[in-house]
Image (spheres, rainbow, N blue to C red):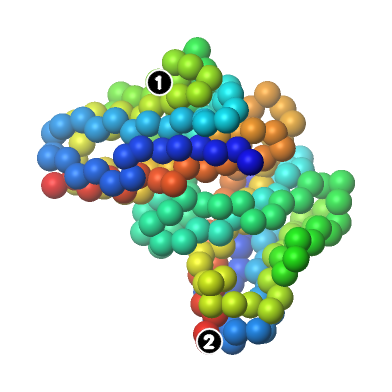
Amino acid sequence: GENVEQHPSTLSVQEGDSAVIKCTYSDSASNYFPWYKQELGKGPQLIIDIRSNVGEKKDQRIAVTLNKTAKHFSLHITETQPEDSAVYFCAADPRYGGSQGNLIFGKGTKLSVKP
Amino acid sequence: GAVVSQHPSRVICKSGTSVKIECRSLDFQATTMFWYRQFPKQSLMLMATSNEGSKATYEQGVEKDKFLINHASLTLSTLTVTSAHPEDSSFYICSAREVPGYTFGSGTRLTVV
């Protein structure tokens, strides 16, 4: 089955710096890769996603890149702000588009942005 | 965008009692919903996949008689934790699939005392 590895587990940056979180996956059939932000005591919120037919996607300060050959994808946050502090999860869906979808999550990265 | 409403947000129950958690898709129909469990500082672990009008599919190691799932309509799935024990205390999160992605509820913090 699919396995998603996420690094680093914790990341501390100064306000204004960039943050990069990396994930690898094992199942070449996976073709949908979302990133979620989870604040304490709340459910995950989708911040950006990418499909396997796209190499890069950007939404203001957030971007995601995908390398299907290497089976890895990364989240890039530029000009970080204290409110970006949260736990970020990557995920892969090995059955996207089929009758049953499912998400396999990485273990999460706790991002701390220091003012 | 798609919204999934989950209730209650917090519940405290006595050991041996049952607790029901509701998950509703507010502006779309969800044929499939998912239930996750999350322990502190850990990732989300899929417990079961809930299918409207049919039996849920449980992940390996999840007791189907303990975690009862009902998906009686296209907008509502419920998770009932039966005969709850302190070790069932956790953060439970539901999710619904709405192409092109998945939307999550706000979670339920269950504490069994």
B78 with respect to A7 (left or right) = left
**Screen quadrant of the N terminus of chain B:** top right
Residue visible at 40% across and 50% down in the picture: B38
Residue indicated by mark 1: B70
Where residue B42 sits in the image (x, y, percent)? 43, 58
Nearer-the-camera pick, A106 or A35: A35
Where residue A49 sits in the image (x, y, percent)? 71, 51
Mark identifier at residue A51: none
- The relative height of residue B43 versus residue B99 in the rendered view (above or below) is below
A106 with respect to B106 (left or right) = right
Where residue A58 sits in the image (x, y, percent)? 79, 61
Residue kind at label 2, given as amino acid type: Pro
For numbered disc 1, what is the local secondary structure? Answer: strand
- Taking the image as drawn, is residue A91 in sight? yes
Chain letter of the residue carrying label 2: A
Residue visible at 59% across and 87% down in the picture: A14
Chain letter of the residue carrying label 1: B
Q: Residues within 10 Å of mark 2 (few under 14, many from 20)?
A: few
Residue visible at 60% across and 28% down in the picture: B28
Q: Residues within 10 Å of mark 1 (few under 14, many from 20)?
A: some
For numbered disc 2, what is the local secondary structure? Answer: loop
**Separation of disc 1 and disc 2 at Cα?**
46 Å
Residue indicated by mark 2: A115
Q: Quadrant of residue A22?
A: bottom right
- The relative height of residue A95 versus residue B44 in the rendered view (above or below) is above
